[in-house]
Amino acid sequence: MLMRAVIFDLDGTLAETSGDLIAAANRCFADLGLGALLDPQEDAATAMHGARAMLRLGLSRVGEVDEADVDRQYPRLLAYYEEEIDRHSTLFPGAMEAVAELRRLGHPVAICTNKPEALAEKLLDRLGVRGDFACLIGADTLAMRKPDPECLRETVRRAGGDPAHCVLVGDTETDRITARAAGVPSILVRFGPNGHRTADLHPEALIGHYDELVAAVQALG
Ligand SMILES: O=C(O)COP(=O)(O)O
Ligand SMILES: [Mg+2]
């Protein structure tokens, strides 16, 4: 039987990206004359829910949120983010050691993120780790995005694994729901901006550091 494929989410799971995401959102708000509406620490968990979530939260602080404004700012935010994608962003401690060990053991290892593909590719490239992952599926790679389980299944297929025998390592309810919809387990992280919320999602396993990941994967059988 093929080894269980281990599929990673990116934001908040492999890398702490909230600082650069919030900086990009605040540049949009500054352009609108609204100042810095998001706080890099207080609002970090919202950044893990994506660009639109950040725009909605910021705009909600100055009035009623109009989705047309969110749509207008979204491409600007992504353009700003692309300009400074790795100023503050770092891989979580031990992440790449765990990835190396999983690969050494024969597990297909890949990424399934709701970041647009080009941005995810660029970030991983800048962090110097793109080559460590068999493939990457972003929000716009397929016709659907997480929590559609087909995203996860297609990531596993492209990585050379069996979609019925995989695990999604993630940090939000989106990851939990995706794995459940695919009928496979998830391992959620207790660190990072959204880590304080993951125990409430009752995943098959939780890890507090990447040095626990290989054992957690093996414990799934
Ligand atoms: O950009 C998002 O919505 C979240 O990205 P992620 O799926 O890598 O956590
Ligand atoms: Mg995430």
Image (cartoon, helix red, strand yellow):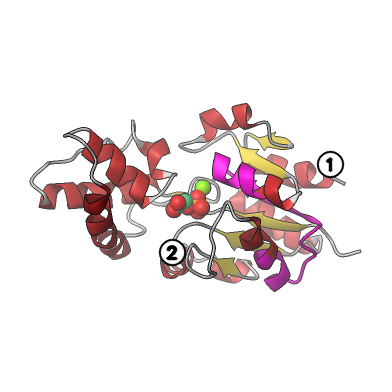
Badge 1 element: helix
Give the mark nearest the N terminus, 1 or 2.
2
The residue lying furthest to the left in this view is 33
Q: Amino acid at mark 2?
A: Pro
Q: Is residue 170 above or below residue 77?
A: above
Label 2 C-beta lies within 8 Å of the nearest ligand 1 atom = yes
Q: Quadrant of residue 190?
A: top right
Q: Residue at x 76, y 61 (%)?
A: 163
Q: CA distance from mark 1 to mark 2?
A: 32 Å
Q: Nearer the viewer, residue 202 or 143?
A: 143
Q: How many marks?
A: 2
For mark 2, what is the residue? Answer: 116
Badge 2 element: loop
Q: Residue at x 71, y 56 (%)?
A: 6
Q: Amino acid at mark 1?
A: Ala
Q: Residue at x 42, y 68 (%)?
A: 122
- Taking 27 as reference, is 140 left or right? right
Q: Point out residue 83 in the picture as x, y percentages from the top left corner.
A: 27, 64
Q: Nearer the viewer, residue 75 or 64?
A: 64
Q: Residue at x 58, y 59 (%)?
A: 112
**Residue 91 seen in the figure:** no
Label 1 C-beta lies within 8 Å of the nearest ligand 2 atom = no
Q: Nearer the viewer, residue 116 or 210?
A: 116
For mark 1, what is the residue? Answer: 219
Q: Is residue 132 above or below residue 172?
A: below
Q: Which residues are magenta?
A: 154-178
